Image (cartoon, rainbow, N blue to C red):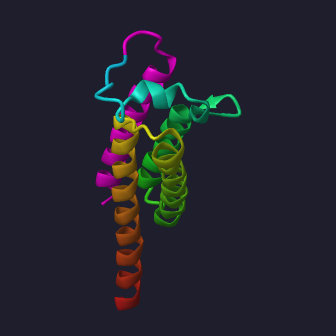
Amino acid sequence: MRYLIVLLAIAGIVVSSLALKVHYDTGSEPCRLSDKWDCGAVNHSPYAVIHGVPVAAIGIAGYLLIGVLGFMRRRGLVLVAVLIGLAFALYLTNIEAHVLEVWCLYCVISQGIIAVLTLLALAWVGWARLRSRAA
């Protein structure tokens, strides 16, 4: 289970890195699919930065933390980290849906990754508790 969590965390780092590239890119947007799907509009909005730090950089750090904690088999801390990440991703998704009314493909992929990581972390903690009760 931990290797799957680490693998998904690496995927999250890659997706967040692509979003960070868009944040700093001033050229053509690689994922402007339509008026409703535009990574540039999302990543250049005022909501793409928190206290001067790009949201994508926060995502990279979060996924890195989840990957390291997963590799170290720190189930409880992985669960806490993914729940914080999920809450943050849901907050950002709400902004995309109701404030910006534009979606970023990288952000949606990241939302899927953190959702799957949350389910895996819940299963990992639950499985460990079941095993300890059975022993």
Q: Is residue 109 above or below residue 32?
A: below
Give the dominant element type of the magenta stretch: helix, strand or loop.
Answer: helix
Which residue is at 48% across, 60% downward? 74
Q: Quadrant of the N terminus?
A: bottom left
**Image quadrant where one finds the C terminus:** bottom left
Which residue occupies the extreme right position in the image?
51
Q: Give the residue at the far top of this rendering.
A: 27
The quarter of the displayed image where residue 12 is located = top left
Any magenta on residue 117? no
Name the residue: 53% across, 61% down: 77
Q: Nearer the viewer, residue 131 or 115?
A: 115
Please report the residue visible at 41 percent of the width from the left and 9 percent of the height from the top: 27
Residue at the bottom extreme of this rendering: 134
Classify residue 74 as left or right of residue 115.
right
Residue occupying the point 51% across, 66% down: 76
Count of marks placed on residues:
0
Q: Quadrant of residue 108?
A: top left
Does the segment drawn in magenta span residue 25? yes
Residue 83 is left or right of residue 19, and the answer is right
